[in-house]
Image (spheres, rainbow, N blue to C red):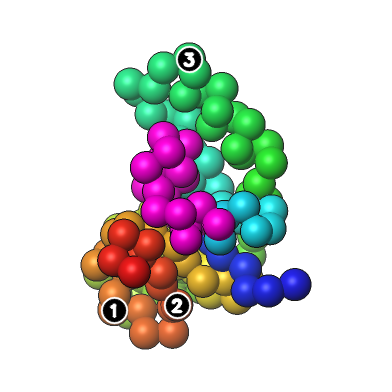
Amino acid sequence: MGQRYLIDTNIVIAYLNGTLPDIAAYLIEEERPCISVITRIELLVWRNASEEHISKMHEFINASIVFNLEEQIILKTIELRKQHRIKLPDVIIAATALTHNLQLITRNSEDFKNIGELQIINPFVL
């Protein structure tokens, strides 16, 4: 098994829309996708989603490993939030990646840049 990845919401949307660079699509398809419960929530509250998008999102979520808010993630979130001024959803995603030793694939690498131990891949700048 190779490196595993946590996929941020913006990457899932690009993937489902077919606008994700091929290298990132390959990383997502290489193994079962991993997402945070935050990504699950963000996808399913997307107000302007068509029925087709909603169906694709449910299929993607059902095919993914969804990491819920377990105690280790909560504690890591608290630690990171005390150290960095990052929005709560983003810090939960970062804590999830760190807790499960996953690289984060995101288009919003700026949001996570101050978390030195977090490995980030922005497929739009590769």
Q: Are marks 3 and 1 in contact (CB under 8 Å)?
A: no
Measured in 3D between alpha carbons, the distance from the residue under mark 3 to the one under mark 2, in whole angstroms, is: 34 Å
Query: What's the residue at 62%, 68% (across, down)?
Result: 4
Query: What's the residue at 34%, 69% (across, down)?
Result: 126
Of labels 3 and 1, the one closer to you: 3
The dot on residue 51 is 3
The dot on residue 114 is 1
> Which quarter of the figure has residue 84?
bottom left
Q: Nearer the viewer, residue 71 or 107?
A: 107
Place of residue 105 in the rendered image (x, y in percent of width and height, measured from the top left):
45, 62
Measured in 3D between alpha carbons, the distance from the residue under mark 2 to the one under mark 1, in whole angstroms, is: 11 Å
Query: Does the magenta portion include 19?
Result: yes
Q: Which residue is mark 2?
A: 119
Of the numbered discs 3 and 2, the one sitting upstream in the chain is 3
Callout 2, which amino acid? Gln
Query: What's the residue at 29%, 66% (across, down)?
Result: 125
Q: Nearer the viewer, residue 52 or 48?
A: 52
The dot on residue 104 is none
**Residue 75 at least partly seen:** no
| Circle 2: element type | loop
Callout 1, which amino acid? Asn
Place of residue 89 in the rendered image (x, y in percent of width and height, measured from the top left):
39, 53
Residues packed near mark 3 inside 10 Å, few (<14), some (14 to 19) or many (20 plus)? few
Of the numbered discs 3 and 1, the one sitting upstream in the chain is 3
Q: Is residue 32 left or right of residue 85?
A: right
Residues packed near mark 2 inside 10 Å, few (<14), some (14 to 19) or many (20 plus)? some
| Circle 1: element type | loop
Place of residue 74 in the rendered image (x, y in percent of width and height, measured from the top left):
54, 64
